[in-house]
């Protein structure tokens, strides 16, 4: 599994975009990038995934660099409820597991 | 809501006792995963099942740990002779295999070993 690196913490003002970076320089060609988040005392929640192209869903957008060595999760209009630990991970469809790092603690301020 | 459910949500036990946790996955999901999470860390993979077959086990899963998924539906995780180091949140997740691995997590069982 590719190793991922994320900043330990980030702050964001409510209503502004939150841009969370992730480095996955060892990712292989068939590995997807996944993002999850974990709100205190709950299980992780799937947000989005991508392989090469940028992706968008109702929760967030995922921008993957052309060389696939890094990605950015974008929460376009952060709310207080987006305060959570955000995990970036990488894996292939044949893998049975996800490998989580320590993630980024995102704090959204009023 | 028919998400992943886990029981019990909290378990306090004394060192040396055995404990068993149950996970009920989303009904159409054929893959089931167990993870362990300690304070301030991301979840760590323990094991996973495809239907009733246990396909991968982490080295973290010592011989005191055993997991089963007898009919390919719910799963149990048993810890024998618990130690204080087993205190953690035990998370279960499920996914519909054969495609991209979007895993859906349950709320977890918090184990405290005194």
Image (cartoon, coloured by chain):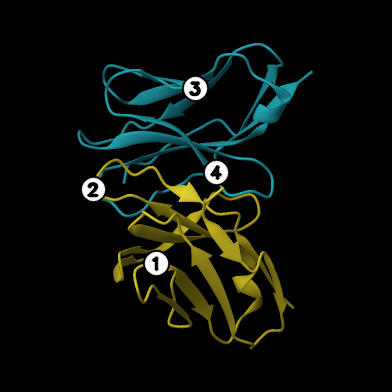
Chain colours: A cyan, B yellow
Spatial CA distance of label 2 from label 3 is 24 Å
In which quadrant of the rendered view does residue A63 lie? top left
**Viewer-side residue, A28 vs B77:** B77
User: In the figure, A48 relative to B68: above or below?
Assistant: above
Mark 4 belongs to which subunit? A
Say which label, 3 or 4, has the lower sequence index: 3
In this rendering, the label closer to the viewer, 4 or 2 = 2
In this rendering, do the residues under marks 4 and 2 share a single chain?
Answer: no
Q: Which residue is mark 1?
A: B73
Q: Which residue is mark 3?
A: A58
Q: Is residue B67 left or right of residue A44?
A: left
Dot 3 crowding, Cα within 10 Å, few <14, some 14–19, many 20+: few
Q: Position of residue B38 (x, y in %)?
A: 61, 58
Mark 1 belongs to which subunit? B
User: In the figure, B10 relative to A89: above or below?
Assistant: below
In this rendering, the label closer to the viewer, 3 or 1 = 1
Q: Is residue B74 left or right of residue A52?
A: right
Q: Position of residue A36 (x, y in %)?
A: 50, 38
In which quadrant of the rendered view does residue B49 lie? bottom left
Give the structural element (helix, strand or loop) at label 3: loop
Mark 2 belongs to which subunit? B
Q: Which residue is mark 4?
A: A102
Residue at image location 21% in from the left, 36% down from the top: A30
Give the structural element (helix, strand or loop) at label 2: loop
Q: Position of residue A41 (x, y in %)?
A: 68, 50
Q: Position of residue B71 (x, y in %)?
A: 35, 74
Does the rendering let one see residue B90?
A: no
Farthest residue to the top: give it. Answer: A16
């Amino acid at each position: 599994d590719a190793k991922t690196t994320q900043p330990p913490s980030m702050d964001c003002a409510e209503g502004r975009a939150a841009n969370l970076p992730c480095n996955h320089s060892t990712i292989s060609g068939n590995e997807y990038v996944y993002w999850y988040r974990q709100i205190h005392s709950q299980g992780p929640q799937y947000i989005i995934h991508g392989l090469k192209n940028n992706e968008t869903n109702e929760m967030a957008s995922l921008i993957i660099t052309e060389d696939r060595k890094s990605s950015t999760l974008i929460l376009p209009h952060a709310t207080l409820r987006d305060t959570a630990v955000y995990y970036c991970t990488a894996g292939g469809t044949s893998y049975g597991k996800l490998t989580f790092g320590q993630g980024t603690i995102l704090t959204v301020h009023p | 809501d028919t998400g992943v459910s886990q029981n019990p949500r909290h378990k306090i036990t004394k060192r040396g006792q055995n404990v068993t946790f149950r996970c009920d996955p989303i009904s159409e999901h054929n893959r089931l995963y167990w993870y362990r999470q300690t304070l301030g860390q991301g979840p760590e993979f323990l094991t996973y099942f495809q239907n009733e077959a246990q396909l991968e086990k982490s080295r973290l899963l010592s011989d005191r740990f055993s997991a089963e998924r007898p009919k390919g539906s719910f799963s149990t995780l048993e810890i024998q002779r618990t130690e204080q180091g087993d205190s953690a949140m035990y998370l279960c997740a499920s996914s519909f295999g054969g495609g991209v691995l979007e895993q859906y997590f349950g709320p977890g069982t918090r184990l405290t070993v005194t």
